Image (cartoon, helix red, strand yellow):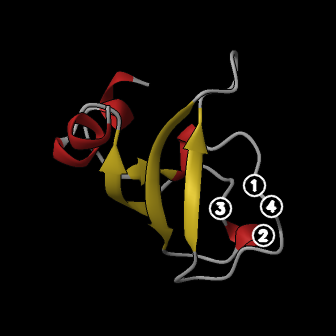
């Protein structure tokens, strides 16, 4: 969680569930599983059915909690 909220891209092992309607290139929200809080916005690098698995980068981070945009809107 701390990696994502610091702006890291999301790796496949970190995804526990994904909407199968997501297409590669779509904007997605990365949500913390326990509390349901949004941590980041990113661009899916794979289709939703391929986001869950054992290895590989699947979401490119665009915006995360604490970045300049977050601070601007807070």
- Vertical position of residue 37 compared to residue 60: above or below: above
Given contact means CB atoms under 8 Å apart, are the residues at marks 4 and 2 in contact? Answer: no
Q: CA distance from mark 3 to mark 4?
A: 9 Å
Given contact means CB atoms under 8 Å apart, are the residues at marks 4 and 1 in contact? Answer: yes
Which circle, 4 or 2, is nearer the viewer?
4
Q: Earlier in the sequence, mark 3 or mark 4?
A: 4
Given contact means CB atoms under 8 Å apart, are the residues at marks 2 and 1 in contact? Answer: yes
What residue does disc 2 label? 49
Checking the image for residue 19, the label placed there is 4
Query: Helix, strand, or loop for circle 2?
Result: helix
Which circle, 3 or 4, is nearer the viewer?
4
- Vertical position of residue 58 compared to residue 73: above or below: below
Viewport quadrant of the C terminus: top left
Q: Earlier in the sequence, mark 2 or mark 1?
A: 1
What residue does disc 1 label? 18
Given contact means CB atoms under 8 Å apart, are the residues at marks 3 and 1 in contact? Answer: yes
């Amino acid at each position: 969680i701390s990696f994502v909220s610091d702006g890291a891209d999301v790796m496949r092992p970190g995804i526990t569930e994904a909407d199968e309607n997501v297409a590669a290139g779509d904007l997605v929200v990365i949500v913390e599983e326990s509390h349901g809080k949004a941590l980041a916005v990113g661009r899916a690098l794979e289709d939703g059915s391929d986001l869950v698995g054992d290895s590989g980068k699947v979401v490119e981070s665009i915006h995360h909690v604490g970045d300049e945009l977050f601070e601007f809107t807070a």
